[in-house]
Amino acid sequence: MPVDARNFAEDFDRNGYATSLDVLQEREILELKDNFDNLENSIGKENAQYSLHNIHTKYPWVLKLSSHPRVLAPLQAILGNNLILLDSRFICKYPSQEFQEDGSDEKFVAWHQDVRYWGIEGDVISVWLAVDDADVDNGCMVVVPSTHKDGILEHKAASQKGNMLTSNQEIPSNLFDATKSVPCPLKAGQMSLHHGHLVHGSEPNRSSRRRCGFVIRYVSTKAHPIDDPERPRKFESTVLVSGEDRFGNFVDNSPEWFTWRN
């Protein structure tokens, strides 16, 4: 965590993202890889791509990642000490050649904003924690800085096949300047943060290496769900991971074995 939390928060507010933040030590990285590899082997690569959703309430090792002090510290600088884990998902992008052999399309993530899918009043911050090294070759996340200042943009059905977003939506290219996009390469054990309104996406994995990341969304306890028929998302796995909740806007679904809250 940067020493000057105030400057970090101001930089994040200006740019809408922060990247290459060191989180896990070497031993922790090896444990993470072992845990995920075991899970991947048990369910298969096809299911590991995008189906591992909100398993933080099932596996202690996943919730330990989600509540890791070095994950939470930058979030606390931005949102304050009282934090709700809103949602989590492992996203694995395997080498395109592995799945193209069976006629599948190259997997990519279209330009989008996370908050387009979240009916939340208040800032949503997404963490992208690298299980594997992520770089341009294997399809690391790409962001368009400062687009979080533009509000929620129109999303339409994606024209290109292979979009990993379950909604299959994308932001029309005329609504933002993709030439200003910036890649966010990460080493395993590092993370990036991005604001829920930031325009971002990722290209196909054209390397021979897996690119897996753990995406975790957080909000302040001050945030609250809103009734929006355009964003009818339910939050059934919310967990208070830091501080206290004096507002009660979200149910605390903490498992009974979650005994290490900050």
Image (tube, grey):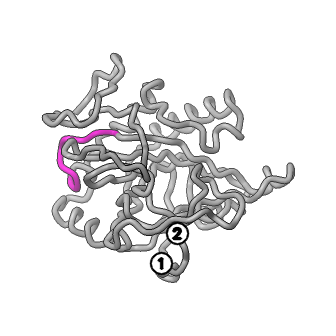
* Image position of 132 with respect to 19: above or below: above
Q: Position of residue 17 (x, y in %)?
A: 36, 64
Q: Nearer the viewer, residue 113 or 259?
A: 113
Circle 2 crowding by C-alpha within 10 Å: few under 14, some 14–19, many from 20: some
Given contact means CB atoms under 8 Å apart, are the residues at marks 2 and 1 in contact?
yes
- The answer to which of 241 and 105 lies nearer the viewer is 105
Q: Quadrant of residue 195?
A: bottom left
Q: Quadrant of residue 170?
A: bottom right
Residue holding disc 2: 171
Q: Position of residue 250 (x, y in %)?
A: 27, 35
Find the residue positioned furthest to the left. Answer: 246
Which image quarter: residue 68? top left
Instruction: Give the numbered dot on residue 175.
Output: 1
Q: Secondary structure at mark 2?
A: loop
Q: Residue at x 25, y 53 (%)?
A: 122
Q: Residue at x 61, y 30 (%)?
A: 39
- The disc label shown at residue 154, or none: none
Verify whether residue 111 appears in magenta: no
Residue segment shown in magenta: 77-85
Q: Is residue 105 left or right of residue 76?
A: right
Q: Position of residue 131 (x, y in %)?
A: 53, 46
Quadrant of the snapshot with the N terminus:
bottom left
Locate residue 60, reporting x and y percent.
43, 25
Identity of the residue drawn at 36% across and 41% down:
86
Q: Please indicate whether residue 107 sits to the left or right of residue 77 in the image.
A: right
Residue kind at label 1, given as amino acid type: Leu
> What's the distance in space between the residues labelled 2 and 1, CA to CA?
7 Å
Location of residue 53 with respect to 202 vertically, above or below: above
